[in-house]
């Protein structure tokens, strides 16, 4: 059986920190990270990292940043050929998630631990595409009925 290649995708800050809780999984498989290029200093202990543009939905250039990230995500996807994309969100990660689904690969989404009673915009959008959708609070099953609750990743 072929070893799976994993893409881990998250925006900067807390979403990236959450993603890094999965580092044992990263070291078990051939993997790489997709995150935003910001002033935030990422620490990923030797993992290959690709950077996409930071996206803020309230900025005038929002759609152009998303389109640029789509182009970058297609390039990254075909260069790396992941079997699975695991994302903790948010906006900047949507393109790589959608590219994975278009290429018939698995998408796993983990909703933020900060969300206890309502979902993120990205989570609500990707819920319909995700092969597995995880929530970190049992109360979130009311928001995402098909989600899987296993507790927090911290």
Image (cartoon, helix red, strand yellow):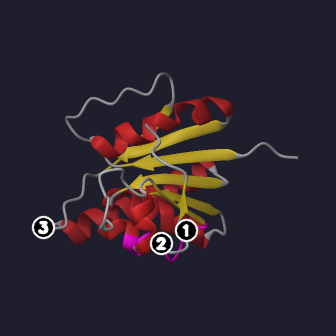
Image x and y of residue 46, in percent? 50, 23
The mark closer to the camera, 3 or 2, is: 2
Q: Secondary structure at mark 1?
A: loop
138 with respect to 81 (left or right): left
Secondary structure beneath disc 3? loop
Q: Which residue is mark 3?
A: 58
Mark in the foreground, 3 or 1 = 1
From the image, tell me which residue sits under label 2.
127
**Cα–Cα span, label 1 and label 2:** 5 Å
Task: Work out which quarter of the rendered image holds the C terminus and state it.
Answer: top left
Instruction: Specify which label sits upstream in the sequence, 3 or 2.
Output: 3
Question: Would you say residue 99 sits in the magenta stretch?
Answer: no
The residue that appears at 12% across and 67% down in the rendered structure is 58
Q: Position of residue 108 (x, y in %)?
A: 56, 58
Quote the CA–CA distance across marks 3 and 2: 22 Å
Q: Which residue is mark 1?
A: 130
Of 55 and 67, which appears nearest the observer? 55
Residue drawn at x 45%, y 45% is 152
Outermost residue on the top side: it is: 45
**Residue 95 against residue 83 in the figure, above or below:** below
The residue stretch that appears in magenta: 124-131
């Amino acid at each position: 059986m072929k070893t799976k290649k994993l893409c881990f995708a998250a925006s900067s800050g807390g979403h990236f920190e959450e993603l890094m809780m999965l580092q044992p999984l990263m070291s078990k498989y051939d993997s790489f990270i997709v995150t935003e290029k910001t002033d935030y200093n990422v620490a990923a202990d030797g993992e290959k990292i690709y950077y996409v543009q930071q996206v803020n939905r309230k900025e005038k250039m929002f759609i152009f940043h998303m389109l640029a990230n789509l182009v970058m995500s297609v390039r990254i996807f075909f260069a790396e050929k992941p079997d699975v994309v695991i994302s903790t969100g948010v906006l900047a990660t949507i393109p790589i998630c959608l590219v994975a689904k278009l290429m018939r690969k698995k998408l796993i989404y983990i909703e933020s631990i900060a969300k206890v009673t309502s979902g993120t915009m990205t989570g609500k959008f990707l819920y319909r595409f995700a092969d597995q959708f995880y929530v970190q609070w049992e109360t979130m099953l009311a928001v995402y009925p098909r989600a899987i609750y296993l507790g927090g990743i911290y």
